[in-house]
Amino acid sequence: MPPPVESMDSLWAPNEQHYINNMARVSVIGAPQTVREGLTALLEETGADEIMATAQDIRPCRAALF
């Protein structure tokens, strides 16, 4: 994954920006306690009984990890 850019304003279409804004609404980012609290609130808000999580990392990968 390439490093982030300064601004996406000139790079994405309105529908892409709308999608990302909707997804960010349910994103939980931060230190362990922050994530714990965010996930708890998300579960309470949605009534979900499971969580599917993804993560992105822009650091170069090391083949030994895979």
Image (cartoon, rainbow, N blue to C red):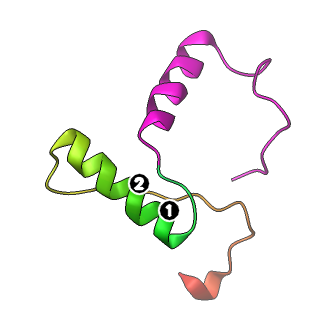
Are there few (<14), some (14-19), or many (20+) residues within 10 Å of tag 1? few
Residue beneath the point at 46% across and 45% down: 27
Is 30 in the magenta?
no
Q: Residue at x 57, y 68 (%)?
A: 31
Helix, strand or loop at label 1? It is: helix
**Residue behind mark 2:** 38
Question: What secondary structure is found at the residue carrying circle 2?
Answer: helix
Q: Which residues are magenta?
A: 1-27
Please name the residue shown 64% across and 82% down the image.
63
Few, some or many residues within 10 Å of mark 2 (<14, 14–19, 20+): some
**34 to the left or right of 42:** right
All told, the count of numbered labels is 2
Residue 58 sits above or below residue 33 on the image: above
User: Which quarter of the picture shows residue 37?
Assistant: bottom left
Q: Amino acid at mark 2?
A: Gly
Q: Is residue 66 above or below residue 41?
A: below
Residue closest to the eye, 26 or 9: 26
| Residue 52 in view here | no
What is the x, y in percent for residue 1? Answer: 68, 53
- Say what amino acid the circle numbered 1 marks: Thr
Q: In the rendered image of this protein, does residue 62 appear above or below residue 12?
A: below
On screen, residue 49 above or below 65: above
Name the residue nearer the viewer: 3 or 43: 43
Label at residue 34: 1
Kindly indicate whether the residue at mark 1 contacts the one at mark 2 (C-beta within 8 angstroms): yes
Q: Quadrant of residue 13?
A: top right
Q: Is residue 5 left or right of residue 61?
A: right
Residue 59: x %, y % from top left: 74, 67
